[in-house]
Image (spheres, rainbow, N blue to C red):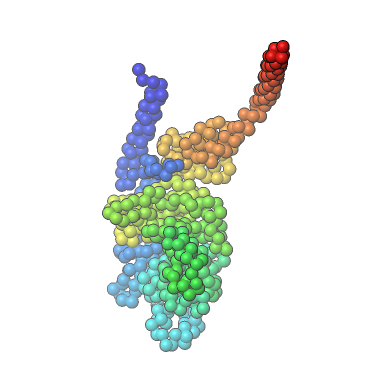
Amino acid sequence: MPSIKRIAARAAAAVMAAVMLGTCVAYADEPYDGYNYDWWEDPVPSQNGYVVDKVITGADIGIGSLNEPSDMFISDSEEIYIADTAYKSTLTPNLKGRIVITDKNFKLKTSVEYLDFSDVQDWVNMKKEELAENVAEYQKCTDLYFDGPTGVFVDNDDVVYVADTANDRVVAFSVEVDDSGIGYGKVIRVFTRPDSDVYDAKTTFNPSKVLVDAAGNVYICIKSITKGAVVFSKDGEFNGYFGANRVEATADVLMNAFWKLIFTREQVKKMQRSVPVEISNFDIDEDNFIYTVTESKTVETDVIKKLNSAGTNIFINLGYSDYTFGDALTKYYRGQTYSSQITDVDIGEGGTINLLDLKTGRVFQYDNECNLLFIFGGKGSQKGTFTTVNAVESLGTKVYVLDGRKASVTVFRQTEFGDLVHEAITLFNSGKYEEARGPWQEVLRRDSNYWLAYIGLGNAYLNEGDFETAMEYFLYNSRSGYNDAFKGWRMNFIRDNFTVIAIIIVGSLVLVYVVASLRGKAKAKKRAEAERLFKAQNKGRED
């Protein structure tokens, strides 16, 4: 006859199977399997938080085919900007790229095809005189057309900033439309190679991404620079570097640090220098914090950072920088190691973090405390999978992913399960712990593998003072949470049973005292008897 434990185990397994079967049926049309990670960072099946809403191509927008688009940005006015990097026009041979602008429904507003420098003619004249002996550089920085733009950003005033990579410049402009209905950029400012001793004259200036903060400072990612993002003031003055990555503490780096303590200065100069990996991309949130990501096959240090105005990584102070971002499992195949390469970051509503993985084509979504919420997307040719992902953006509850090779934008919408998780996260982060309990319970009812729901419920009960229930949710999911709940439970237990505990302690002390006294008297009596016998024996010998 089976034991009660075995029956319970079989019942639990049946419930899990039913839940997962329901998940597979509900999202059988999705080309990717929903999964997440538990507390031990083991992958477990999970419901999808996002599914494909639609896939948009250049033909859908009404501009022909996109050609290797590299970046995408959604402005505060909910307009979508796409840097169509390799676009070429048969009418304008010099045109090698454009900026396509649509509304949030991908209805075409205009396509920026050329630039107008008439409002910055003084700057053009100055550059002509400054670069009199370098005609090629002058032609680049004053080119009327784009040449391989790979980054686009729009500030609160609808000023567009484009990293025009092959032209070695970042150009800021307002969008206008000429009499022929063709869009163009009315140039406001151009950012080129800094004329400063701080900027190495041998270093190229080939900007790949651009970002602007609330004060108008312009941050530029340059692939050949490892000191951080290049920063200009809104007036075009070079202000130095921002947010450099740390050098990863590999065995070689540690060994070099050891030898530097022993070698002479001349020997140290001959040693190979250890430099950090350059920043790959960034985004800025509504509180003006800048998030940077590092796309690297091997380096795990500073994969994502949250920087304040001083360039300090807040994630280090909070302990989040030690988290694993992207796929927790590193794969080894045919002599090569494959791990996530985070190529872009997007900060959505409520501080939600969307990380785009170049290697797997997946989006990893985290809350503002870096707890993993959902994983969706993947590599492939079906809708919802990608070939070469380049950019991720979000608007409301939708996530947009740009595929450069497929030349399309895939729009993901939240599922009911995704709505539940986000509702629970929002309520809990707002301090509404009791209100968050209901959504978390519904999340677990739909997906018993969803680890974060156990943490959410544990925290909810912890804040309500129900420490025993909190311990049950934390037991296999959070060591720190369990310790906090146990401390609370222990204090309550001592307080509620103080009289009984005091009686037991006093009784135990009295019992110990009585037993010790009795044992002492018994020993004294035994010792007296021994002395009496000893005296009697001695007396017998004397007689």
Q: Horizontal and vertical percent for residue 82?
A: 39, 63
Who is closer to the viewer here, 226 or 269? 269
479 or 20: nearer the eye?
Answer: 479
Q: Quadrant of residue 72?
A: bottom left
Q: How many marks?
A: 0
Taking the image as shown, residue 516 lies to the left or right of residue 110, namely right
- x and y, in percent, of residue 126 in the image: 49, 84
From this view, report whether residue 131 is shown above or below residue 497.
below
Position of 291 relative to 375 (above/below)? below
Seen from the viewer's position, the closer of residues 36 and 58 is 36
Quarter occupied by the C terminus: top right
The answer to whether residue 178 is seen in the rendering is no
Q: Is residue 333 visible?
A: yes
Q: Residue at x 63, y 31 (%)?
A: 492
**92 left or right of 478?**
left
Q: Report the residue at 70% width, 16% height from top.
A: 538
User: Dividing the image into 4 quarters, which one contains the N terminus?
Assistant: top left
Identify the residue at image location x=36%, y=66%: 84
Of the pair 33 and 182, the residue shown nearer to us: 33
Residue 517 vs residue 166: left or right? right
Residue shown at 47% from the left, 71% from the top: 268
x and y, in percent, of residue 60 in the image: 32, 58
Residue 501 location in percent, x, y? 66, 25
Q: Quadrant of residue 69?
A: bottom left
